[in-house]
Amino acid sequence: MKSDQIIYVCSNCGEEYVKWQGKCDNCGEWNSLKEFKVISSRHNAKTKSNLQNIQIVDLSKVKTSNFQRISSKISEFDRVLGGGFVKGSLILLGGEPGIGKSTLVMQVAANLNNVLYISGEESVTQIKMRAERLNLKNAEIKLLTETNIDSISTFISNANFSPSLIIVDSIQTIYSENFPSTAGSLVQVRECALKLQKLAKETDIPIILIGHVTKEGAVAGPKTLEHMVDVVMYLEGEKYHGTRILRTAKNRFGATDEIGIFEFESTGLKEIKNPSKIFLADRNKKVPGSVITATIEGTRPLLVEIQALVSPTSFGYPRRTASGFDLNRLNLIIAILINRAFLKLGGFDVYLNVAGGFYLKEPAGDLAVALAIASAYKNIPVDSKLTAFGELGLGGEVRSVTFESKRLSEARRLGLSKTLKSKNIGGAIKELENA
C-alpha cells in the first residue's frame, strides 16, 4: 500500500469508499462523501510476536461472580445506566450546548473517588469555577487538559493511580497525529473513540465521552461512533426550561427505555423523585382542553398534562401545531375525531402541548389528546380527577394498553380516581359531556 491513501467517508453513516461518488450506497445520502488522507501505518500487518499474544477463552470458564456495578450515587443517573457503571464500559453522553452535560458529569465525578477529568475545551481554572458554583470544592477529581489521544493513552497507562472513572469533555476535541485532519472530523472522532474503547477494555475503567450534537439532534461525527460505544445517552429538555430528561438510545447492560428526570437549579441538576407531581404542579383545573394521561417510561409510570387549544382558522387551510407530540399522529387523531366522533374541526386551528417540556411517544396518550381537543372544541372543562389513556384505532375504537395497573396505581396515588369506561371515542366524549 502507498504511504498515503485517499479515502472518502460518508458524513452521515461513516461508510468508506476508495473513490468519490455523488450518492452513498449505504444510507442513500447525496453529496455526503468527504475526502480524507490515511497513513498506511494503521494497516501494518501483525508480527509473529503479536500473533503469539492472541488467546482463545472458553466461554464456560469466564467468571462473573464478582461482577459489581459502580454506583454514581445519583439514583436517576443509575436508573438510566441500568444500575450503575459497568467496569470497562464506554459511555457516550450527548446533548445540545448549554443543556447541562458537563454539569451532570461533574456532579457524578464528585460522588466518586479518583476521577480523571480530561478537558479539551476548558482550562483548569474554568473547571474549578464550575465546581465552586456547584459547591463541589472538596471533590477528588484529577484534571488533565490534553487533546492528543496518544499522550492521553500513555499517561493513563503509566499513571501511578487507578481512576475509578474517566471523563472526556469532549470527544470532538481529541485528535491523533497519525491522521492529518482537524479534531472533530469524521476520521478523528472514529479513530480516537476506537483507542478509548480499547483503553477502557484493557484497564477495566469506565469512560464517559461527552459529544456535541448536530442541528438534527444526533451526536456529531460518524454514525459508527454510536455503534462503538456500550451506552448512548442523551440529555434533553428546553434550554430555557428547568426540566431535564436523561434518555438512553442504546444500552448493552440495561433497558433502553428508562429515563432520569432532573431539575436545573443554580447549584446544578437536582434529581426529581416524584416527577408526576412536578409535571402537574401548575395545572389549571378549570380550563377546557386540559387532560391528564398516564404514560410509561421504562418501568416508571408518569402523569403528564395534555393541553389543547382550538380556534377558528384565519386562513384557508387550518393549522395543526404540536409541542411534545408527533405532528403526524396529531393529524391522524384529528381525522378520527372528524370522521368517527363527528367533530367539525375542518375550519379550526388545533394547537397541542405536552406540559413540562415532556415528549409523549407512546400511543397510550392518544385518548387523552383526543379528549383534550374535544374539550377545547366544545369548551367543556374535564373533571380534574380524571385520567385517560388508550390507543385510538382508525375505526374510533379505544384499545387497551400495557401496564394498566401501574398507570392506575400512579393516578390513584396523586388523587386521580376517575377513568372513562367507553371503548370508542364517541362514547368517551359523551361521558366527558355528562360528567
Image (tube, rainbow, N blue to C red):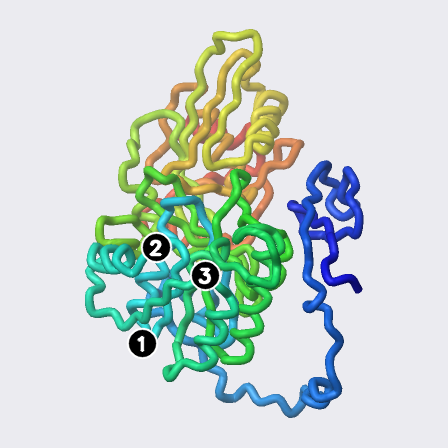
Rounded to the nearest whole Å, what is the CA distance between mark 1 and mark 3? Answer: 23 Å
Q: Is residue 421 visible?
A: yes
- Residue under pointer 2: 122
Alpha carbons under labels 1 and 2: distance apart: 22 Å
Q: Amino acid at mark 3?
A: Thr
What type is the residue that disc 2 sits on?
A: Glu
The earlier-in-sequence mark between 1 and 2 is: 1
* Residue corresponding to mark 3: 147
Q: Residue furthest toward the bottom?
A: 61
Q: Label 1 sits on what residue type?
A: Asn
Tag 2's secondary structure? loop
Quadrant containing the C terminus in the rendered view: top left
Check whether the beta carbons of the residues at disc 3 and disc 2 lie within 8 A of each other.
no
**Residue visible at 74% across and 57% down?**
5
Secondary structure under tag 1 reads: loop
Badge 3, how many Cα within 10 Å: few under 14, some, many 20+? Answer: many
Q: Which residue is mark 1?
A: 113
